[in-house]
Image: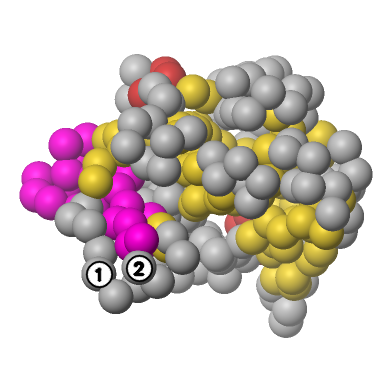
Amino acid sequence: MTLYDFFDLIKPPFNFGGFKVAFVKSTDGGDTWTKPQIIADLRTVFVTDPNTGATIRTGAIIPEPAIDPATEQLYVVWQDSRFNGGHFDEIALSTSTDGGATWSAPIQVNTNTPVNRPAFTPSIQVNARGTVGVTFYDFRSLTTQTTTLPTDYWFVTSTNKGASFDTEVRITPTSFDMFTAPFSRGYFVGDYEGLDTSGTTFVPFFVQANDENTSNRTDVFTTTISP
């Protein structure tokens, strides 16, 4: 049995050069492991409210992996600012077809429409048809407001093994206010959101804030998506 363990390899200095998307591999069921193998720099600049600068706590240094059980192709997604000159985080993806020996150059999963805003806390999974699904949050609904921070959760798919991604689908029915979320070193809805599959159906698992409900600031949600 081959096992893979993905993580953020952190070395000083703690900036673009200090965070690495990496993994170790075991081909004997976990008895022995390779040395850490680096996939790419993890160039997060972390997430803030673009209007106020308020800190948003996200999965900034948590790479999320997936494997296609039919082909054993590997995928990993993470937050990265490389696509916009280091100004804000977006969603990066790299893939490997040879058991992690080589990896593709990172590509951008999310779009920037209608405005350039951070995207964060991605999850990834592959369904029974080989379709790759990715979920993430972003602030694209934000305009000039400073007392609220409208936030949405999105789903996007790739039918060509991660080479490109199709039109995004919003999972949250309406935007929720991130400023209602608990504050723990930043407004925080959690950084362990997930994405699973049942056959060809994707099953996202995520948290959103309950607008202005300070007695129950967040709840956990799930739904099904059949692309």
Is 129 in front, or is 190? 129
- Rounded to the nearest angstrom, the CA distance separating label 2 from label 1 is 7 Å
Callouts 2 and 1 close, C-beta under 8 Å? yes
In the rendered image, residue 51, in percent from the top left (x then y), is placed at: 52, 34
Q: Residue furthest bottom?
A: 215
> Which residue in the structure is indicated by mark 2?
28
Range of magenta residues:
5-27
Q: Is residue 83 magenta?
A: no
- Residue at screen point 35% across, 72% down: 30
Is 77 in front, or is 199? 199
Looking at the rendering, which quadrant does residue 27 occupy?
bottom left
**What kind of residue is marked 2?**
Asp
Looking at the rendering, which quadrant does residue 152 occupy?
top right
Q: Secondary structure at mark 2?
A: loop
- Residue at screen point 72% across, 38% down: 130
Looking at the rendered structure, the number of numbered marks drawn on it comes to 2
**Colour scheme of this structure image?**
secondary structure
220 in relation to 130, above or below: below
**What kind of residue is marked 1?**
Thr
- Residue at screen point 37% across, 41% down: 100
Looking at the rendering, which quadrant does residue 223 occupy?
bottom right
In the rendered image, residue 32, in percent from the top left (x then y), is placed at: 25, 69
